[in-house]
Image (cartoon, grey):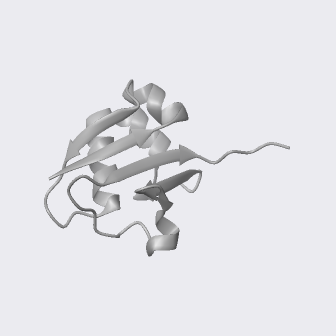
Amino acid sequence: MKVRFKSFGSVRRLLKEKVIDVEVPNYSTVRQVVNRVVELGGEELRNLIMHDDDISGNLIVMLNKKDVETLGGIDIIVHDGDEVTILPHVQGG
């Protein structure tokens, strides 16, 4: 199935595209989609997105424009045509 992956900031610069379509098996999770994107993007992207074997706490991960934390976490199942987005935390004052 295809899932759309959108990125912003540093992740977007490394992928060189704002939106990519990612093929993943049925019943994949958001975590698996992100892992697939990391595989496609290489080591520099892995260092940016991952912290050990988990997604960095410096990023916001969304599924269909909703924070995955409000949907039950990163292991929520995605469906064909869903959209996973990674955003950097915005800081400032």
Is residue 78 something that shows in the picture? yes
Q: In front here: 1 or 13? A: 1
* Residue drawn where x is 13% and y is 58% of the image: 25
Name the spot of residue 43 as percent of width and height, x first.
36, 35
* Residue drawn where x is 34% and y is 70% of the image: 76
* Residue 60 placement, left or right of 37: right
Which quadrant holds residue 46?
Answer: top left
* Residue 50 placement, left or right of 33: right
* Residue drawn where x is 34% and y is 60% of the image: 30
Q: In front here: 69 or 48? A: 69
Is residue 52 something that shows in the picture? no
Name the spot of residue 93 as percent of width and height, x first.
86, 44
Q: Is residue 79 above or below residue 8?
A: below
* Residue 85 placement, left or right of 22: right
How many numbered circles does the render carry? 0
* Residue 82 placement, left or right of 67: left
* Residue drawn where x is 63% and y is 48% of the image: 89
Name the spot of residue 6 as percent of width and height, x first.
40, 41
Q: Residue furthest right?
A: 93
